[in-house]
Image: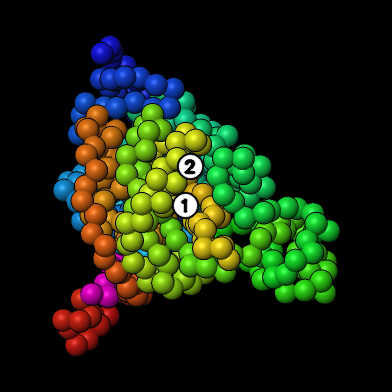
Amino acid sequence: MRICFIIFFNYNTQNIYIIKKINSTKNGCRLRRKISTVMIPGASAPAGINTIKSLRLSDFSGKILSTDSNALSAGFYLSDYYEVIPEAEADDYLEVLLNIIDKYSIEVLMPSSGYDIFPFSEFKSKLKKHGVIPVVSDRKILEICRDKIYTFNHLNKFFRLPYTTLNPDEIDTYPVIAKPRFGKGSRDVIQVTDEQEKKYICSKYPNMIYQEFLPGDEYTIDVMSDLESNPIISVPRVRLQTKSGISTKGKIILDKELIEESMKIVKKLKIIGPSCIQMKKDKFDQFKLVEINPRLGGGTIFTTLAGANFPKMILDLVEGKKIDPPKISEITVLRYFEEIVLDERNKINYIGKDLLTSNACRI
């Protein structure tokens, strides 16, 4: 095993970063030091909040910085620090991100936002020069997963996928699903039942894809791969209830076919770190791949509570620890809203769970 030391000098903060690097690859590195500060983007969304909660449930003793473009993000008040940042597509996003990394000496960027992972990947080399490890796949892989036509064309020869096309004239069997080519969650996903509805969708929604309708149960499979894109563990669950694309009730089901197929998919794509895969049964009761998200998903906490804490595994991988797949429990998880109450100065006053042990709100 070759061992080398990398030294980064940050001219802005005058900090020197000394990293002991083992088994270097183009995708990342493993550090022989304990991570003390991590950044979790997407603090207003379930994936970011799930990531914060998962680290709080682990033995991680470091500091958590959460970020979001929304100044009223619930995850801010579950973190040690927070920063409001521009949206990931903004011209000044990278400059602000680098300043935050330097200010807080961030060591790991968590892939907890479907937006931030793109600049994380695109500027991976520059970010590493600031002493931070972005745990994210290569940009080409992210594009394959984001573009549903690209997903179909890239994987259809190797795995079962619902037939997918951009051309509505190819559709002559109903019902069919119309959805945005680059959509997230279940936004603008429409079941089309006849030719007239299809014509309406074509006129109202540009850049839609048309996909074979799958009538069966829907499953999410959380998969963790190492920094060299080797899958470590797969945790499937059936989605018992879904709202706005986010699972609100689910049951862990250790289905062998789902486990093996999902690990083959992420291996084929060479995904680094966490991913969440959506699969659904067709009319012949066969699983078909619907969507791939190369990041931590909105239901990450399901997998954490079942025994596989993906955010903590990410830190262990970066620290160079060997990951042994944990035992998974086939639990059922029910989710609900929880309140955070702020005073007139936006200082935290109450968290929902405290309401159960008190009669009044302290405002």
Residue at image coords 26%, 72%: 351
- Marks 2 and 1: CB-CB under 8 Å? yes
Instruction: Answer with left or right where residue 327 lies relative to residue 169.
Output: left
Q: Nearer the viewer, residue 129 or 208?
A: 208
Instruction: Answer with left or right where residue 184 lies relative to residue 253.
Output: right
Q: Which residue is mark 1?
A: 277
Classify mark 2: helix, strand or loop: helix
Q: Earlier in the sequence, mark 2 or mark 1?
A: 2
Q: Residue furthest bottom?
A: 359
Q: Position of residue 341 (x, y in %)?
A: 32, 74
Q: Say which quarter of the image contains residue 172.
A: bottom right
Span shown in magenta: 346-353
Residue at image coords 37%, 38%: 231
Residue at image coords 62%, 44%: 156
Q: Nearer the viewer, residue 97 or 298?
A: 298
Classify mark 1: helix, strand or loop: strand
Amino acid type of disc 1?
Ile
